[in-house]
Image: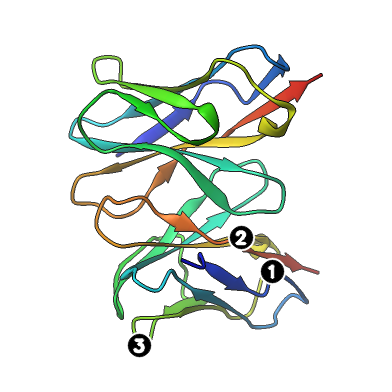
Amino acid sequence: DTGVSQDPRHKITKRGQNVTFRCDPISEHNRLYWYRQTLGQGPEFLTYFQNEAQLEKSRLLSDRFSAERPKGSFSTLEIQRTEQGDSAMYLCASSWGQNQPQHFGDGTRLSIL
Amino acid sequence: AQSVTQLDSQVPVFEEAPVELRCNYSSSVSVYLFWYVQYPNQGLQLLLKYLSGSTLVKGINGFEAEFNKSQTSFHLRKPSVHISDTAEYFCAVTQSGYNKLIFGAGTRLAVHP
């Protein structure tokens, strides 16, 4: 169990640019989640995959956001045309079943200049 | 809709003193409850979970929590804190059949020598 891995740990970009984050879940986990955390707040749910199927998306996930999990293993989260309000920590988590504990990665901190 | 309220945004305490971090949730159906800890610039680490069974749950690092259905609470306790317990603590809930976690805003525990 090597834990959930996220890359990069930090991303600084100019407003309007596109960014992509990667998450590698714990290998035996079939469920993968993305959350966003802003300063002083708890994480907020963005989207969830079971294997390669994206089964739920929050209304926080605007059209500029897209997530994929092409082979049911790693996942990517892309933000197009970034805005100042996208600055946050993006957390990935995985679990092996419904209602089972979710294990989190260390996150990707996005800063928009 | 589900919600989680962490009643204290900050809790200062002296080393070796006991501490209680309060968490209340709103839900009319079966819930699963979790406490996570977050150290600076890191992801969330699971402290303990309540899925079913005994209402007193023991976790890592000497923490425990008690599920109280009638008061819809899941307070976190530790009989004697250490400097290393200084961190942000998040309470989270999910419902049976759901997948996303709903987090509280967090409680910052500051342990002073």
Q: Where is mark 3, residue-wise?
A: A71
Q: Nearer the viewer, residue B47 or A42?
A: B47
- The residue where tag 2 is placed is A106
Q: Is residue A86 above or below residue B16?
A: below
Question: Considering only order in the chain, which callout, 2 or 1, is on the residue closer to the N terminus?
Answer: 1
Residue drawn 44% across the image and 33% down it:
B59
Please say which color scheme the image uses. rainbow
Please give the label number shown on residue A9. 1
Q: Is residue B105 visible?
A: no
Q: Earlier in the sequence, mark 3 or mark 1?
A: 1
What chain does mark 3 sit on?
A
Q: CA distance from mark 1 to mark 2?
A: 7 Å
Q: Residues within 10 Å of mark 2 (few under 14, many from 20)?
A: many
Residue A61 rendering spot, x and y as whole percentages: 45, 66
- Report if the CB atoms under discs 3 and 1 are less than 8 Å apart: no
Chain that bears disc 1: A
The amino acid pointed to by label 1 is Arg
Q: In this rendering, does residue B91 appear at all?
A: yes
Q: Is residue B35 above or below residue B67?
A: below
Question: Residue at position x 52%, y 27% from top?
Answer: B62
Q: Are marks 1 and 2 on the same chain?
A: yes
Task: Check disc 2 and give the amino acid type.
Answer: Asp
SS at mark 1 in the image: loop
The quadrant where residue A49 appears: bottom left
Q: Give the Cα separation between the discs numbered 3 and 2.
A: 23 Å
The local crowd at label 3, few if under 14, some if 14 to 19, many if 20 or more residues have their Cα within 10 Å, is few
Residue under mark 2: which chain is it in?
Answer: A
Left-right relation of B54 to A34:
left
For the residue marked with disc 3, what is the amino acid? Answer: Lys
**Which residue is painted at 40% across and 74% down in the image?**
A27
Category of crowding for the residue at label 1, using alpha-carbon neighbours closer than 10 angstroms: few (below 14), some (14–19), many (at least 20): some
